[in-house]
Amino acid sequence: MIRRPPRSTPSNSSAASDVYKRQALRRWTDFMAIREFIQNALDEADRFNEKPQIKTEPNKLVIINPSKKLLPKHLKIGGSEKECWERGRYGEGLKVAAMHLLPRSQIYIYSHDNAYRFLTDGKDLYLLIGTIDNIGEKTIVEIYNPPRIDIKTMIYSEPTFVEATYSVPGCQVAKPSKIKKEPNKLYVRDIYVNTLKELTGFSSLYTYNLWWVTLSEDRTHVTSTDGLINAIAELINLLVPSDKEKLAKDLIDQTSSEQPYGLKINTNYLESVSYTHLRAHETSLHL
């Protein structure tokens, strides 16, 4: 049985009005909207120690992940049950993403024995709720006529060069931060954010996938450039000695010239900021 909630009355304090305020504030793009659905799938799959399946079909994007049962309360505007280590923590993301994609795209969500479809009349967001035969402990999102987004660039991919797993004060859940031998990209919690050149003013020899960095609300910038640089330095500092040596040798190969006085770091690279964390290894590297 499908039911439709009553039409809300638009007002300055209505949920729909709040959606539009947030949407204007965050300047939503197609990339940001699709990212919301994917990061929710990543969070749920993490709880099961699995990876989501993401399929791009003609005129359809399908996202499948193991999950707890998605209930109507999880699709309300505002509020969040996300843990400190999870990706989407603003509460309204999925709903604003749906509002951005509608009506050009059609969005269906199936979870256990529940079925949902987002609808809009151009002003308000509505949710049709139904039941289906149980599909098991998983959620399936189907987006018909999705925007053309390169999904491969959105999600961090292996291989990783070096990594460290650690927690931070305020969130005692150890999570991995990674360095990849690919230039100049920043991922946070496996989701692409921006180029490091754009964020810091420095180019980078490596790509970083950091867990413990605070993003601005649009999630394409960081709240603090110093915080980002410190997070990279912290990751390097927490590498096991063999990985520090591995990174130092690679950094030398990419930036050094034959000098009688040892290593010369090109200061145009972000890695020069974190070089002090590698200096302890100069003796073992015979610099």
Image (spheres, helix red, strand yellow):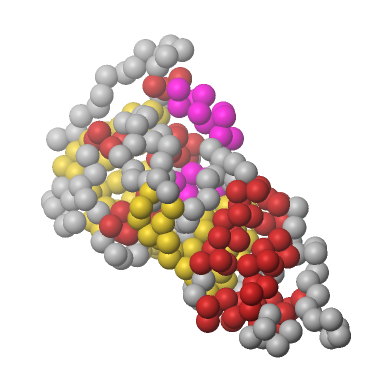
Magenta stretch: dominant secondary structure: helix
Near-viewer residue (106 or 66): 66
Q: Is residue 90 above or below residue 55?
A: above
Near-viewer residue (249 or 241): 241
On the question of residue 77 being in view, the answer is yes
Rendered location of residue 213, percent (x, y):
53, 50
Q: Is residue 4 above or below residue 186?
A: above
Q: Which residues are magenta?
A: 18-37
In the image, farthest residue toward the right? 260
Near-viewer residue (187 or 4): 187
Point 45% across, 20% down: residue: 17
Q: Judge from the rendering whether residue 154 lies leftward or rightward of residue 168; answer left or right.
A: right
Quadrant holding the C terminus: bottom right
Rendered location of residue 34, percent (x, y):
47, 49
Point 53% across, 81% down: residue: 242
Does the magenta run of residues contain 121? no
Quadrant holding the N terminus: top left
Q: Is residue 221 above or below residue 270?
A: above
Residue 138: which quarter of the image? bottom left
Residue 115: which quarter of the image? top left
Point 59% across, 80% down: residue: 245
